[in-house]
Image (tube, rainbow, N blue to C red):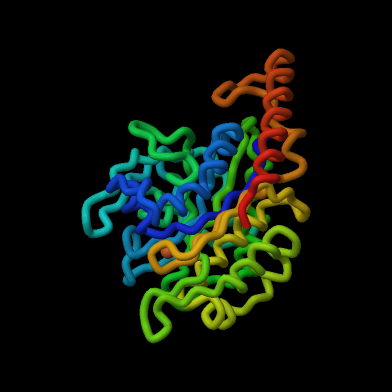
């Protein structure tokens, strides 16, 4: 059985991608941002997911204003980086997981969430920047297949936070009914508070952001009741991206362990937020190395010891997390 072991949320500021691509990560301005993800990369290297589901929004790269699906699931075998105006980012083509994606599409659509199925799609910074922040900048290949889930937060009306949260629950149900033994990490991306145009351009509301992060861990249902107008008022026009974090949160247990958090302002004109939440039931799950289809007693024992090591590591991270 497949299972969701953890959720990761991260801003996807395009300037972070540009800083990586132009080798500016050691400059003091950017070092402050990237240093907040060092522990996260260590966590991810230990978690070693078999698949990542990345909830993000397209920024007129794959979909123009002529056609904007509310929820679009990437079912292709691969997803090339999009040309966002200055050539595609120098990141590897993302490999998909068509079998799991098709299974999720079937399960979720039969649960009455009307996803758009996408069999060809390029992905922009909304997806590639969080991948960099958690997996680094690989030369040839990303360490695991990715299933993109694009959400409309660029043209009114976006989905409600409650709809997103419930979609997360449906995705979890889908993953848990997939027969292959896979560990899945789900990403929520975007945010935090920012507004990129108009009289309030540059708006950042750290108090509201931190309250959102607190509730994401402790009381996500409270967040599902936030109306769009509150996101707009408090977190800026682009703060609405934060509804995507609720898909990630809906896919997790009601009670989770917050193993890491990072928040800094600004990066470009945006507040950067990041959190890692683990499901408490994760240790009951996978007991074999990634890529094998059979479970043996030897691999079970190895899996348990890896899980124990990962748990130790995450507790160490939790004690050092920045808020
Ligand atoms: Fe965005």
Q: Quadrant of residue 224?
A: bottom right
Image quarter where the N terminus lies is top right
Outermost residue to the left: 86
Q: How many numbered marks are there?
A: 0
Tell me: residue 305, above or below residue 151. above
Outermost residue to the bottom: 199
Give the x, y percent position of residue 141.
38, 33
Give the x, y percent position of residue 79.
37, 45
Image quarter where the C terminus lies is bottom right
Q: Is residue 252 visible?
A: yes
Give the x, y percent position of residue 204.
50, 74
**Along the line of sight, the residue nearer the viewer: 85 or 200:** 200
* Residue at x-position 26% and y-position 54%: 83
* Residue at x-position 71% and y-position 40%: 315
Tell me: residue 306, above or below residue 107. above
Q: Quadrant of residue 168?
A: bottom right
Horizontally, residue 142 falls left or right of residue 37, namely left
* Residue at x-position 46% and y-position 53%: 32
**Along the line of sight, the residue nearer the viewer: 123 or 63:** 123
Tell me: residue 312, above or below residue 258. above
* Residue at x-position 52% and y-position 80%: 232
Outermost residue to the top: 298
């Amino acid at each position: 059985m497949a299972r969701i072991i953890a959720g990761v949320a991260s801003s996807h500021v395009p300037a972070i991608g540009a800083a990586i691509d132009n080798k500016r990560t050691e400059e003091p301005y950017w070092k402050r941002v990237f240093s907040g993800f060092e522990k996260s990369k260590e966590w991810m290297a230990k978690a070693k997911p078999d698949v990542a589901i990345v909830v993000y929004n397209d920024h007129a790269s794959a979909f123009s204003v002529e056609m904007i699906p509310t929820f679009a699931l990437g079912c292709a075998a691969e997803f090339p980086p999009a040309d966002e105006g200055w050539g595609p980012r120098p990141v590897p083509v993302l490999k998909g997981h068509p079998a799991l994606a098709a299974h999720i599409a079937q399960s979720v659509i039969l649960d009455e969430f009307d996803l758009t199925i996408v069999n060809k799609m390029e992905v922009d910074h909304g997806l590639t920047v969080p991948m960099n922040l958690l997996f680094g900048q690989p030369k040839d290949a990303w360490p695991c297949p990715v299933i993109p889930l694009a959400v409309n937060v660029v043209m009114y009306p976006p989905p409600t936070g409650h709809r997103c949260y419930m979609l997360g629950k449906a995705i979890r149900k889908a993953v848990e009914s997939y027969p292959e033994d896979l560990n899945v990490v789900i990403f929520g991306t975007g945010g935090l508070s920012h507004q990129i145009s108009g009289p309030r351009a540059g708006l950042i509301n750290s108090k509201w952001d931190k309250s959102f992060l607190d509730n994401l861990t402790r009381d996500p249902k409270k967040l599902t009741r936030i109306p769009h107008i509150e996101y707009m008022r408090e977190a800026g026009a682009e703060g609405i991206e934060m509804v995507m974090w609720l898909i990630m949160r809906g896919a997790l247990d009601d009670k989770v362990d917050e193993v890491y958090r990072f928040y800094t302002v600004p990066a470009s004109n945006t507040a950067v937020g990041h959190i890692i939440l683990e499901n408490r039931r994760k240790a009951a799950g996978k007991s074999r190395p990634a890529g094998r289809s059979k479970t043996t007693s030897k691999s079970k024992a190895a899996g348990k010891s890896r899980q124990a090591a990962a748990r130790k590591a995450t507790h160490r991270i939790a004690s050092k997390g920045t808020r």
